[in-house]
Image (cartoon, grey):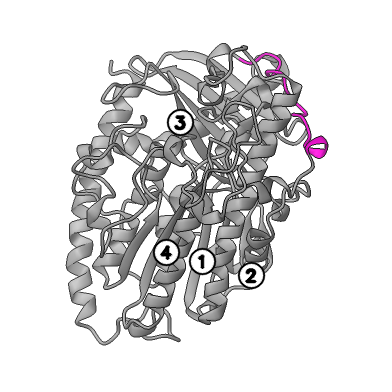
């Protein structure tokens, strides 16, 4: 008998073969369509007036912003974008770590389909023929450009920046977060924060990566505005990822005593050990095993300062969109690759299936949809590929794992899927080219989050979790083993098997 995990891998390989054949067929159809005078999917626009795409990514930002109801976070520019677009209240990443999440979003395929679960492996090492989201736009006559971190910042190698996706070489896309240290002409201002993984210096925005990315992106918008072909401009900001080192002015937006401590600092009652991790990304800088109360406040303060810093950079982009009158023909998308823990659940950073890691901010603003909309429809980041293809009237790509969200943009009450799936490995950071030992698959429904941790090679169930999001939205009690939920667990397990395929 073939183990569940091996069956999944076999299905993935078969699915990929189907993807490759379907995309070859799509390429043939594109040639036919482009020779036809009826190359108009909508009846109100011609092909030469196709919408542009401004594709804005941030790193490690959880769904706690002013527009998401968090009054403690200062994010006026992202909030303004939400007023122009549709805010997705229940959007989920596919794996809460950078490379798998971004590779999944940009190929429109789940981590299991492409076999990417670690940080170092480039998806083209396994599937060089896949057509990415920006590459599909490039093939349809768009000018595609990458400024900042869009794909994961892989080690410099043959795939750096994923050249097939872009019309021109990517810039400011490859580096280490640890190298994002201030660059200033004058003597370096002092660091006013003594807590590890934080830095507070009175420097201009352009001293860090994101300030320079914003400046280059505004310049690119000016250039593309006067060009003939439509554009897909991907702008990837490195914040609020650690180290938490925004310029002082953004720290000053918050009073340290007003920065709250985690409201649920303890692990969930009944949580299996495998659902937790060692929080190494943040705690490696601490001599003690855990930050004290003041250090915790400082870390959280620095994270919020990073949000406000990147929000200001996004404000520069949106200001250029206003100045150039691009709202009338440009889709603006804002997304984060995953969320983040700030001491909740006795965790820091990401690499879990908890809500704070899996749920992400997502806003889509189009020229034709009502602004200020909100939807509680369950969606996933893999849905962005088919959504943007649909919005911009490009030939559809078959065999993607996501679905178009245009019906939700048309009517925010629309339900396009009954569940969203996030997964994570154990160990949390598996080595390059090594399968994980265990995979945790999480299904989110309207009311619950159900998770199965399974041995990756045998498929054996290692542990399970069930959280009642109606009565316990912070996921403080695992009720999977409670007898009154046995029928529910069986039903959710069935739904999860169906979603995994």
Q: Is residue 491 visible?
A: no
Q: Is residue 316 visible?
A: yes
User: Circle 2 sits on which residue?
Assistant: 84
User: Circle 1 sits on which residue?
Assistant: 332
User: Circle 4 sits on which residue?
Assistant: 216
Q: Is residue 374 magenta?
A: no
Residues at circles 4 and 3 in contact by the CB criterion of under 8 Å: no
Residues at circles 3 and 1 in contact by the CB criterion of under 8 Å: no
- Residue 343 location, quadrant: top right
Q: Give the residue displayed 66% in from the left and 52% down from the top.
A: 376
User: Circle 3 sits on which residue?
Assistant: 497
Q: Earlier in the sequence, mark 4 or mark 3?
A: 4
Q: Quadrant of the C terminus?
A: top left
Q: Earlier in the sequence, mark 3 or mark 2?
A: 2
Q: Secondary structure at mark 4?
A: helix
- Residue 49 location, quadrant: bottom left
Q: Using the numbered discs, state the Cα–Cα distance from disc 1 to disc 4 in whole angstroms.
A: 17 Å
């Amino acid at each position: 008998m073939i183990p569940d995990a091996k069956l999944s891998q076999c299905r993935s390989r078969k699915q990929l073969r189907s993807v490759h054949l379907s995309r070859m067929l799509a390429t043939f159809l594109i040639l036919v369509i482009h020779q036809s005078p009826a190359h108009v999917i909508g009846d109100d626009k011609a092909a030469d007036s196709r919408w542009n795409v401004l594709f804005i990514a941030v790193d490690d930002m959880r769904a706690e912003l002013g527009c998401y109801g968090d009054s403690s976070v200062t994010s006026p520019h992202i909030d303004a974008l939400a007023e122009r677009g549709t805010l997705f209240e229940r959007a989920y990443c596919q794996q809460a770590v950078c490379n798998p999440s971004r590779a999944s979003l940009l190929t429109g395929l789940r981590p299991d389909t492409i076999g990417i679960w670690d940080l170092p492996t480039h998806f083209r090492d396994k599937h060089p023929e896949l057509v990415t989201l920006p590459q599909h736009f490039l093939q349809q006559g768009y000018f595609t450009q990458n400024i900042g971190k869009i794909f994961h910042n892989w080690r410099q190698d043959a795939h750096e920046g994923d050249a097939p996706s872009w019309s021109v070489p990517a810039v400011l896309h490859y580096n280490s977060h640890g190298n994002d240290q201030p660059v200033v002409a004058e003597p370096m201002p002092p660091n006013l924060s003594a807590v590890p993984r934080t830095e507070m210096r009175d420097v201009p925005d352009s001293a860090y990566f994101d300030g320079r990315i914003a400046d280059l992106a505004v310049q690119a918008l000016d250039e593309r505005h006067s060009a003939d072909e439509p554009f897909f401009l991907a702008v990837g900001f490195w914040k609020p990822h650690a180290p938490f080192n925004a310029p002082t002015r953004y720290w000053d937006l918050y009073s340290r005593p007003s920065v709250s401590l985690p409201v649920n600092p303890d692990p969930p009652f009944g949580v299996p050990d495998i659902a937790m991790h060692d929080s190494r990304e943040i705690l490696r800088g601490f001599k003690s095993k855990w930050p004290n109360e003041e250090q915790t406040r400082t870390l959280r303060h620095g994270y919020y300062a990073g949000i406000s810093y990147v929000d200001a950079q996004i404000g520069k982009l949106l200001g250029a969109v206003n100045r150039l009158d691009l709202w009338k023909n440009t889709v603006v998308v804002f997304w984060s690759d995953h969320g983040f823990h700030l001491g909740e659940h006795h965790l820091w950073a990401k690499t879990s299936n908890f809500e704070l890691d899996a749920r992400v901010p997502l806003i889509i603003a189009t020229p034709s949809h009502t602004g200020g909309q909100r939807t509680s429809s369950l969606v996933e980041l893999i849905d962005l590929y088919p959504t943007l293809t649909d919005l911009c009237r490009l030939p559809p790509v078959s065999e993607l794992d996501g679905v178009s969200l245009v019906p939700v943009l048309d009517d925010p009450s629309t339900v396009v899927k009954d569940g969203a799936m996030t997964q994570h490995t154990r160990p949390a950071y598996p080595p390059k080219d090594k399968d994980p030992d265990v995979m945790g698959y999480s299904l989110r429904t309207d009311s619950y989050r159900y998770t199965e941790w399974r041995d990756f090679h045998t498929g054996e169930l290692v542990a399970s979790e069930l959280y009642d999001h109606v009565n316990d939205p912070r996921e403080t009690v695992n009720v999977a083993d409670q007898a009154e939920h046995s029928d529910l667990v069986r039903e959710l397990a069935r739904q999860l098997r169906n979603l995994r395929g």
